[in-house]
Image (spheres, grey):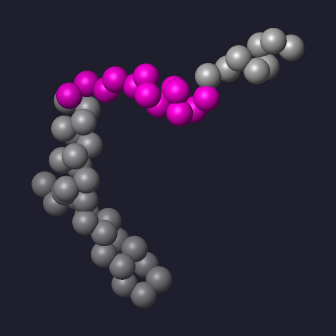
Amino acid sequence: MKHLYTKPSKGEQLNKLNPKKETIQFLLNYSKALHITKHRQLSFEFILN
């Protein structure tokens, strides 16, 4: 029973994340290059590199 209530919360788990600098840079560059165009009900995704 004790173990059911002692799990760390998701907020505590997120605070322990320590991504590499390269990972952060990759995600930022990807999000800058991603371009989404919507036309009627269609969505087109382009990576502009």
On screen, residue 30 above or below 10: below
**In the rendering, at what x and y percent does residue 35 appear?**
25, 66
Q: 4 or 22, which lies in front?
A: 4
Which residue is found at the position 61% from the left and 22% from the top? Answer: 8
Q: Residue furthest bottom?
A: 40
Q: Is residue 25 left or right of residue 12?
A: left
How many labels, in total?
A: 0
Q: Residue furthest top?
A: 2
Which residue is found at the position 47% from the left and 83% from the top? Answer: 41
Q: Looking at the rendering, in which quadrant would you find the N terminus?
A: top right
Q: Residue furthest left?
A: 49
Region of the chain picked out in magenta, as a range: 9-21
Q: Is residue 49 magenta?
A: no
Q: 3 or 20, which lies in front?
A: 3
**In the rendering, at what x and y percent does residue 49 appear?**
13, 54
Name the image quarter holding residue 48. Answer: bottom left
On screen, residue 30 above or below 7: below
Q: Residue furthest right?
A: 1
Q: 37 or 25, which lies in front?
A: 25
Q: Is residue 17 magenta?
A: yes
Which residue is found at the position 24% from the left and 36% from the top? Answer: 24
**In the rendering, at what x and y percent does residue 19 appear?**
31, 26
On screen, residue 32 above or below 18: below
Name the image quarter holding residue 15. Answer: top left
On screen, residue 16 above or below 11: above
Q: Is residue 4 left or right of residue 21?
A: right
